[in-house]
Amino acid sequence: MTKPSPLRDFDYNVIEDILEEGLQMVYHAYLERRSPKLYGLWNPAEALVQINPFLRRQEGKELEDVIILHEWLHAYGDLILEVPNDRFREEQIHWWAQWHCRQDPYVATYIRSFFVREGFWIAGSEKAVFRKKEAA
């Protein structure tokens, strides 16, 4: 029997653990100017997630949510799971990012809530209810 991927265990408690590791997240226009254009980038040397600031306007909030989760899953692998960089393929990380967004549509909004000063706007945040998922 195949053992489930540890990327499945990403949750609100993991987000807080990653934040305690000092992760920062910013919008970075450089990603738009790159060729090819990047939607997001995880920089492990600086514990920094960079998101393309034009992504939401050009592709929509749903894709920005997935990209935020995608980059945070990279950070999860590096900072919490401490696995080698090549442990997870990009396709695996992207699949799990989409899965987490489907399972909990507010998880990316929860992440954004820590980075409002960096320009991450939270539409309807006054109505959003963030609840920590209890560890099983």
Image (cartoon, helix red, strand yellow):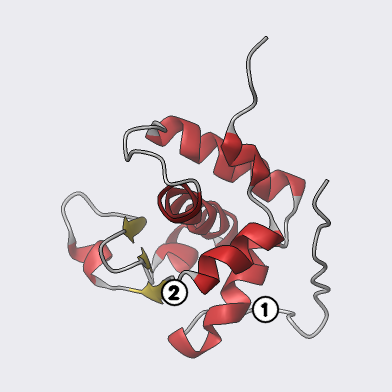
Callout 2 secondary element: loop
- Residue 70 location, x and y as percent? 48, 49
**Residue placed at 59% from the left, 36% from the top?**
6
Q: Specify the quadrant of the image occupied by residue 114.
A: bottom right
Mark 2 or mark 1: whose residue is earlier in sequence = 2
- Residue 12 location, x and y as percent? 70, 61
Residue 51 visible here = no
Callout 1 secondary element: loop
Q: What amino acid does circle 1 point to?
A: Ala
Q: Which mark is residue 22?
A: 2
Up/down of 58 relative to 73, above or below: below
**Residue placed at 43% from the left, 72% from the top?**
25
For disc 1, the marked residue is 123
Residue nearest the viewer, comparing 63 with 40: 40
Up/down of 10 relative to 50, above or below: above
- Residue furthest toward the top? 1
Residue nearest the viewer, comparing 11 with 106: 11
Q: Quadrant location of the N terminus?
A: top right
